[in-house]
Image (spheres, helix red, strand yellow):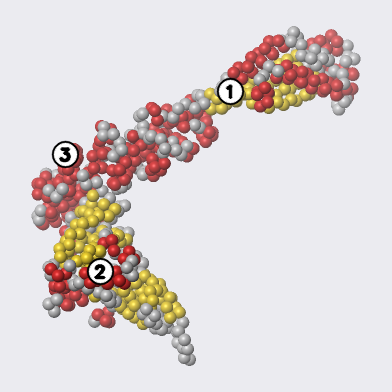
Amino acid sequence: MSTSNRFITILLTGIIAFSGLILEARNINVRGTVMHDGTQDPIYGVSIYNKTTNKLIGTTNDEGRYTVNIPDDNELEFKVMGYENASVEVNGNLNIDVYLVPLAQVLDEVVVQSTITKALITEPTDIEVKGNYLHVKTHVKIPHELFSSSMRMIIQPSIYNITSKQRTFMKPVVFDGQRYAITQERMYDWVPDKDPLLPYVQVKNTGHRKDDILTIRDSIYVENPNNDFRCDIMSSLENYNGIVYADTIMIARGTINPLRFLSYSIQGSPVTDENFFPSPEMQLRDTKGNVKLTFPVGKSKLIMELGDNRNEMDRLIAQLHDIENNPDMTLKSFSISGTASPEGNYDRNRQLAKARMESAMNVILQGLSPMTRRNVEVSSDADVASWSEVAVMMRSDGHDEEAQSIEDIIGRYPDNITAQSRKITALPIYKSLIRDEYLPRLRNVHYRFVTSRYRYLTDDEIKELYATNSSEMSRYEFWRLYNQSAEEDREAIIRRALEVHPKFIVGATDLAAILIDRDASDVSLLESLLATSKRDVPDESRLNQGIAYLNAGQYTRADSILSLTPDTERYHKARIYSAALNGRYMDVMQEVSEDSPINEVLLLLAIKADDQAWEKAQHLGGSAKEEYIKAIAANRTDHYIAASTHLENALKLDPSLREIAKVDGDVLDLLNDESENN
C-alpha cells in the first residue's frame, strides 16, 4: 500500500441519498481517531484545520480522539510535529480515522539518496529515578549542514507517562541563526517577549561550519515513579516561511530504579513528650439537694425555733455559700414546693401555702450575693394536701377504722374539699388524733436546688459518656480512655476522638503509628494538621508522616518533613532510608548496606558500581526478588545468558514481577527478547 493510500481510512457511518440536487453544504460533527501509521498508537495534540478556510477547528485528546464541526463539503487537514501533514475531504462522512506517517520514514528514504548528514543524531540514554524525580542526560549532534543563519532549530525533550497517558515537556533548546534572530525581532515590532521561546533562545554564529554537540540534562517531578515512562526528543527546523524539517525520536524506554526493591521496615512512634498530652478538663455536672421546713398552724412566717427549722436552714445556707465560693460551681436553679394542711377553707389554704413559700424564699435569697440572685432560676409550686393523704398515713400506723371514717366522708363529698374539712373536723377523733398527730406532717415547704459544677469525671463516668454521648467528651477524656483500653479498641476510640476534635494532633499521631505498624499507613491523616498547625508539633508527628510518605512512594515529601526531625536513634532509620531513596547514596551507603545483603547490591547498582554489584549479587539467595536483582546486575555487566536465566527464574517464582519488568529499563531488553523467542 502506498503512503498516499494508507494514511487515511474512512468509516462511512451514513450515506443519505437524495433524488434532487444539494443546493448548499450543511455543518456536521465529524469524529475520529488519529493514529501512528506503523504502531497504531493514538497521537495526542494533533492540530486539525479546516483546510478550505485555513482555520484551526480542533485538536486530539490523550486517546487521539477528536470531534470537529465542519461543512460537509470542506476538507480537513491534520498537522503535528514529527509527522507528515494529512488532508482528507469530508464528503459528508461523520467518522474519519486518520493514520499519520512519521517524518522519520521520509527521512529514511532521503538517507538512501545520501542526505544522512541532514538529520539530528541522538544517543540512547536512561531515565534514572531519584526519589520522585526522573533524570535524563543525553547528547544531541546537530550537523552543520542542517543549520544556517536564516533558520531556527527547536529541540524539545519530553517525558511521556505511558501508564497515565500524560506528556511532560522539559526545557527546550532553541538555536537561532543570526539572520533569523534579527528577523524575529522585526516581526514582533521590537517587542521580543511576544516570542514564547525567547527565554530559551541561543543565537548561533553559523560561520564556523562545525557540528554542534548539545548536552541535554534535565529532571521532572512525578507522583508515581513506578509508572511506565519513555523519553522522546522532538525536533524541528524552520525558516521564515514555516517548518522545513521535523522529527521525533524515542531515546529511552522504562526507568532505571534498582531501589524499587530496597528492603526496610520502620516502625511508627506514638507521642512520648508529655508536654503535648491534653490537660485534664473539668466537665459541668449537675448536683441536687433537698431541705424541709415546718410552719405553725395558720401562720406564714418562718419560725426558726419550730421543729428542726434552724438546723435545716443553716445547712441550706451553708450549702449555697459553698456553691458561691467554689469557682468551679454555679447555682443553676432554686425551686420551692409548699404544702398546707387541708383543714378549713381550701382557697385560704392555697394562699397560705404561697405566703409561706415567699416568706422562706426571702430569708434564703437574702443570704446570697446579688449576682447569684440575678442569675439563679427561681420557681415555686403551692398546693394543699388532701384528706386522702391523712387517711393513707393513718392506715400505715394501724388506725384502719379511723382512716375508714375519713374515706367515707371523702366518698360522700368527692369534689368539695371545704365540705370534707367541715365533716372531718366534727369527728370525735379530730382533736385528739388528726389535728395534733397527722396535720403537722402535711404543713411544710420543700426546697430543691440544682447546681452545675465543673469537676473531673471518673473513669467509669468517662466510659459511660463514651457509650452514650461521646460528642461531649473532651480531648483529655478520649486520651484517658484510649490509654486504658485494650489494643483492639484503641483505633476506634482515637478515630472517634478525631471526629469530635479534628485538630487533636497527638491523637492523630498515635493513630498514624498504629496504621504504620499494621502496614496501612495513611498520608492524609496528619498532612493537613502539620500544614495548618500554628503551634509546635511533636517530632513523632513528623516522623510518622515521613514514614507514611515513604510507604506511599512520595519520597520528596518524605525527605522534606524528615529533615525537620532530630537525628537521634528514634528518627535515624527513617532519615537514612529517605536519603537513599532520594539519591544521596554515598551519604548512607554503609548504614543501609549493613541492614541486608540485598540493600548493599541495590546501592552498588544505584551508584553504577556494576561489577561490584554483580560480584555481591551472586552470593544472594534464590528468592524471586533476589533472582530479579541478579538479572539486573548480570545484564549491566554483559553476562547476558546469566541475566536471562535469573530473570526467567524470578518470573517463575513470582509472576507479578513481570509487571515491574515491563517498566524497568534494566531488564526491558531481556523481557523483549523472551517475548520474541516465545
Q: Position of residue 334 (x, y in %)?
A: 68, 23
Which residue bears the numbered disc 2?
A: 181
Residue placed under numbered mark 3 in the picture: 590
Q: Which labelled disc corresponds to residue 544?
A: none
Helix, strand or loop at mark 1:
strand
Give the label on residue 329, or none. 1
Q: Amino acid at mark 1?
A: Met
Q: Is residue 124 left or right of residue 34?
A: left
The residue lying toward the viewer, choosing from 464 and 178, is 178
As helix, strand or loop, the secondary structure at mark 3 comes to: helix
Which marked residue is nearer to the observer: mark 2 or mark 1?
Answer: 2
What amino acid does circle 2 point to? Answer: Ala
25 versus 226 height, above or below: below
Residue 436 percent across, percent down from the top left: 81, 10
The C terminus sits in image quarter: bottom left
Distance CA(mark 3)–CA(mark 2)? 54 Å
The one of 417 and 583 positioned closer to us in this rendering: 583
Residue at (46% x, 82% y) in the render: 26
Viewer-nearest of labels 3 and 2? 2
Quadrant hosting residue 219: bottom left
373 sits to left or right of 586? right
Where disc 2 sits, the SS reads helix
Q: Is residue 388 visible?
A: no
Label whose residue precedes the other's in the sequence (1 or 3): 1
Upstream in sequence: badge 3 or badge 2: 2
Whole-angstrom CA distance, mark 1 to mark 3, is 64 Å
Q: Earlier in the sequence, mark 2 or mark 1?
A: 2
| Mark 2 vs mark 1, CA separation in Å | 85 Å
At a point 75% along the width and 25% down the height, the residue shown is 381
| Tag 3: amino acid | Gln
- What residue is rendered at 42% in x and 78% in y? 70
Front one among 13 and 417: 13
